[in-house]
Image: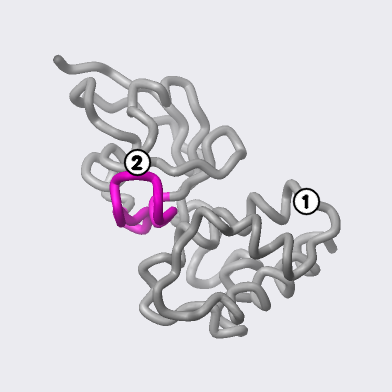
């Protein structure tokens, strides 16, 4: 069965026809070619598919496209450009908060949401706030440093 979904993606109105069983991450990657949102586990364990859904970080593999009707979705492609990186992207680069890069888009989207929601971030609260995002390369130390650096920039 096909459905029509109307939503806002990275600030642009989008109408897509897809199967009723299509997940949001599939819609973003396969229909809209926004491949920065990664598919890691398909079970909501890794966080590689994290996007902002009406301003909050969610794992796009856990949401059906049909549930996104009317939603405002922001992907990693919607937060900055190569010429004008988001402060979180800049901080990840400067602090070497990535290695292979697979988890990075989801980690950045979760970190932005964390900074926007929490006033006084500590190393512990950053680690707890990013608990749903798995990185198999970095050991998280530089990721935490990147979030701390970006938080001060984002709150200026």
Query: Which residue is drawn at the image coordinates 85% and 58% (left, top)?
Result: 120
* Location of residue 136 (image quadrant): bottom left
Indicate which disc residue 61 carries.
2
Q: Is residue 51 above or below residue 135?
A: above
Q: Position of residue 123 (x, y in %)?
A: 74, 70
Which of the two discs, 2 and 1, labels the residue nearer the N terminus? 2
Query: Which residue is drawn at the image coordinates 46% and 49% (left, top)?
Result: 50
Q: Position of residue 31 (x, y in %)?
A: 23, 40
Query: Which residue is drawn at the image coordinates 23% and 20% (left, top)?
Result: 20
Q: Would you call the spot at circle 2 few (<14 residues within 10 Å), some (14-19), or many (20 or more)? A: many
Circle 2 — which element? helix
46 is within the stretch colored magenta: yes
In screen coordinates, is 21 left or right of 140? left
Image quarter in which the C terminus is found: bottom right
Image quarter in which the N terminus is found: top left
- In the image, the segment drawn in magenta is 35-49
Q: Is residue 143 above or below residue 96?
A: above
Q: Position of residue 19 (x, y in %)?
A: 18, 24
* Location of residue 16 (image quadrant): top left
The residue indicated by pointer 1 is: 118
């Amino acid at each position: 069965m096909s459905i029509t979904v109307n939503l806002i993606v990275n600030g642009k109105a989008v109408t897509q026809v897809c199967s009723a069983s299509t997940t949001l991450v599939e819609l973003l990657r396969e229909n809209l070619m926004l491949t920065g949102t990664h598919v890691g586990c398909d079970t909501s364990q890794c966080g590689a598919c994290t996007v902002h859904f009406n301003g909050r970080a969610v794992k796009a593999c856990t949401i059906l496209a049909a549930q996104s009707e009317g939603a405002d979705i922001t992907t990693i492609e919607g937060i900055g450009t190569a010429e004008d990186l988001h402060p979180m992207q800049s901080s990840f680069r400067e602090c070497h908060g990535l290695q292979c890069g697979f988890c990075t888009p989801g980690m950045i989207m979760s970190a932005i949401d964390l900074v926007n929601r929490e006033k006084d971030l500590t190393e512990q609260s950053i680690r707890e706030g990013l608990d749903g995002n798995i990185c198999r390369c970095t050991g998280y130390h530089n990721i935490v440093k990147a979030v701390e650096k970006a938080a001060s920039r984002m709150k200026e």
